[in-house]
Image: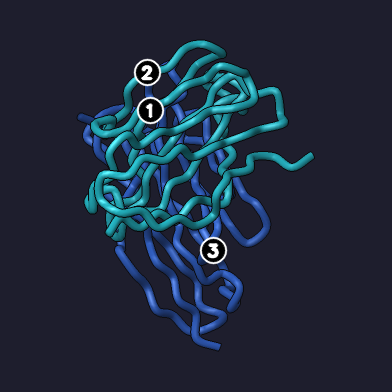
Amino acid sequence: GQQLNQSPQSMFIQEGEDVSMNCTSSSIFNTWLWYKQDPGEGPVLLIALYKAGELTSNGRLTAQFGITRKDSFLNISASIPSDVGIYFCAGSSSNTGKLIFGQGTTLQVKP
Amino acid sequence: NAGVTQTPKFRVLKTGQSMTLLCAQDMNHEYMYWYRQDPGMGLRLIHYSVGEGTTAKGEVPDGYNVSRLKKQNFLLGLESAAPSQTSVYFCASSYSSGGDATDEQFFGPGTRLTVL
């Protein structure tokens, strides 16, 4: 079945640093979504991408839908302590609404 | 507007016991989903529903059953719980799957299940 490879698996950075994470797939997706999960909570949508090449920002977050439709990246600029959590990419390639999730990137920010 | 709610939040079962997890959404969404989350494995789809009265299998359906008798509710059942079903279970819903903003899934807070 379809799989997403998300990297890195974890990051430990200093407050103020920029962060970059990405997801790659062996198959084409029509939609890429990026979610953040805080401890003990459900994932919350950060950014949604619907067109190849699309670059979208949400505050300090920027995400891009790869031209090949097989990858996406998420950048966080000037990280702050509340950025701590697990970030998931998710892709959809069918009209059933089913999402395939990456394994997640755990981000820790040192004040 | 509560969004997606799940009950219970925590549960401990003994092997062989049964239970039902309830998911409710008040956003008039057509599509609903049940996922399980295990360390290092992201979220895996158990079952989903594209409308009232319909259900379909996801990636890891074995050992689970679901029902969608009302549009706003999606129930996940474990008939005979096993330790391998110890996990955090998330329900989600979306308006539809039009390849646009209607794809976006909204998640509940999760149910932490331990099977001894």
- Kindly check if marks 3 and 1 are in contact, taking CB atoms under 8 A apart as contact: no
Q: Are marks 1 and 2 in contact (CB under 8 Å)?
A: yes
The residue identified by callout 1 is B47
Q: Which chain identifier belongs to the blue chain?
A: A
Query: What is the chain letter for disc 2?
Result: B
Report whether B15 appears left or right of A53: left
Query: Do marks 3 and 1 both belong to one polypeptide chain?
Result: no
Residue that numbered label 3 is attached to: A38
Q: Position of residue A18 (x, y in %)?
A: 50, 71
Q: Quadrant of residue B22?
A: top right
Residue wearing tag 2:
B56
State the residue lying farthest toward the top: B53
Along the line of sight, the residue nearer the viewer: A75 or A101: A101
Q: Are marks 2 and 3 on the same chain?
A: no
Residue placed most toward the observer, B32 or B98: B32
Q: Quadrant of the N terminus of chain A?
A: top left
Instruction: Categorize mark 2 by other alpha carbons within 10 Å: few (<14), some (14-19), many (20+).
Output: some
Foreground label between 3 and 1: 1
Indicate the amino acid at tag 2.
Ala
Q: Nearer the viewer, residue A6 or B37?
A: B37
Q: Dot 1: what SS?
A: strand
Depicted B95 relative to depicted B114: above or below: above
Q: Residue at x 79, y 39 (%)?
A: B1
Residue A104 in view? yes
User: How many C-alpha atoms fall within 10 Å of the one at disc 1: few (<14), some, or many (≥20)?
Assistant: many
